[in-house]
Amino acid sequence: MEVMDLQQWHQEAKKRLHKIGQEHLLRFWDELNDIQKTDLLCQIDRLELERIPEWVDNYVHGEGTIEIPQDFEPAPYYPAQPPLERKEEYERAHIAGEKLLREGKVAGFVVAGGQGTRLGFDGPKGNFPISPIKKKTLFQIFAEGLLAARNRFQAEIPWYIMTSPLNNEETIELFEKNEYYGLPREDVLIFQQGTNPNFAFDGRIFLSGKHTIAKSPDGHGGSLKALYTSGAVSDMRDRGIEQISYWQVDNPLIHVMDPLFIGLHAQAESGMSSKTLKKSGPLEKVGNFCMVDGRITVIEYSDLPDEQAYRKKPDGSLVFELGSIAIHMISVAFVEKLNRHGFALPIHKAVKKIPYLDEEGNVIEPDKPSGVKLETFVFDALPMSKKSIILETIRSQEFAPVKNATGTDSAEVTHHMMIDRAADWLQRAGITVPRTKDGKPDCVIEIAPSFALYPDDVKSKIDQVPPILPGNWVYLA
Ligand code: UTP
């Protein structure tokens, strides 16, 4: 009876796959045992088969359907330094943000489901050692930041971590092994995002094994769905959480909890808000914050026409000067609303080196791009929020992503930026930092979040800082 069922299931799947030109997924059927057969059929059932032909047409054969709006303007924003007339507004927001933190209404949320292929690091990227002296990992730095915020605001600040099926187990093992980096275990919640199948350039879905469909995480945009389907949002409701502080796993300079940002976002009753920084040049590879039909929208660098990218204001600065850096505040109500009403983010195509099984069943590890991955981006949800604010931050203070093994956005650059920021914080408190002729710190400094979460924290601790001489290594905790 059971064998019969499996056969029927197989026939059914075969028919459905045949209709959309994907029956090769069953190519190795006769070589599989019953467990493997069942596993493969389950994977096929989980594919959104009815959407596959559209995906193949639009994103594998085509370039996608993301349309650039006819009319768009630069988005309004809160400058990093408030102009005199807005000082009070900033102060009020700061107080409101602190209040939400003290009331335990804010959670941390890091998206850590990416594959980190550019960095080429073995294991979850959160385990990458990055701090200049203690070589703390990214996860440890975030955890210490949250611990310091918990102490400061005397509140529970739960931390949600999104992984993908490719790194979930390893991530959990890391947290277990490191005893949750000092955080209460019940306040660290790890959940998985969804996946999309990988396609060959001819539109056929890749197999990665004889009974395994090749899949990859559905992009950081998948977080908005996964927060809901995983039960994370309902857990947040149980805990009285109203706001989510969102960041990426690759940025050790992040202020995990920023009262000003939290306050500005909450006071504006925004569903989703963003931090921004001034782009380093017209073509910097970051999204551009624009205003489209009264909604804040990110237009990708690759989609912004050059004549717009180079446009200047009378003072010489760029018209489209605000870059998107993947730091957001998101309200719990916004995530719920999106999911209750059914939403879909636009799909982005990424041509990548994707390992696959060839027709003979050999695993091929390509050394050049072999196919297409489909992802969604979290910032595409911004226009779904009626209200949304943008707060400017300063690159050297809050944005140093570890993306590449060498060059731009590499660990080496981030390492130096961490030292530069620490030196800056000390200097602002009146401490002398030795510098080389070109102005770089002539020492290595690491500030632990327990010592200072924000630059002003250093001022009350200057007596704990030893004199710093050229070549010194100074760790402050
Ligand atoms: P990136 O765009 O840098 O992608 O992710 P990546 O997968 O980590 O790295 P490459 O492109 O393979 O080199 C930005 C952030 O979004 C998360 C990443 O973990 C990182 O924090 N992300 C990305 C997810 O959580 N899921 C995804 O599907 C993609």
Image (cartoon, grey):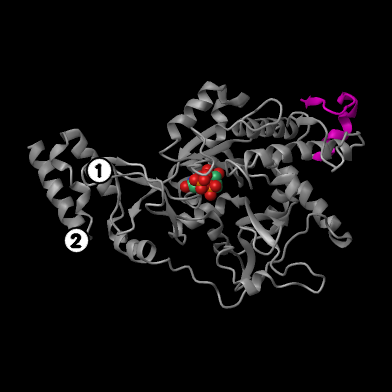
Q: Residues within 10 Å of mark 1 (few under 14, many from 20)?
A: few
* Residue 289, horizontal then vertical, whole percent: 64, 63
SS of the residue under disc 1:
helix
Mark nearer the viewer, 1 or 2: 2
Q: Is residue 19 magenta?
A: no
* Amino acid type for the residue under numbered disc 2: Lys
Q: Pointer 2: what residue?
A: 19
Q: Is residue 474 magenta?
A: yes
Q: Quadrant of the N terminus?
A: top left
* Of the image marks 1 and 2, the number of the one nearer the N terminus: 2
Res. 256 visible in picture? no
In this rendered view, identify the residue nearer to me: 86 or 133: 133
Q: In this image, 154 relative to 173: left or right?
A: right
Q: Residue at x 56, y 35 (%)?
A: 126
Q: In this image, 100 relative to 385: left or right?
A: right
* Amino acid type for the residue under numbered disc 1: Cys
* Residue 33, horizontal then vertical, whole percent: 16, 33
Q: Quadrant of residue 69?
A: bottom right
* Residue 380, horizontal then vertical, whole percent: 53, 60
Part of the protein shown in magenta: 455-477
Q: Pointer 1: what residue?
A: 42
Q: In this image, 123 relative to 320: left or right?
A: left
Residue situated furthest bottom in the rendering: 70
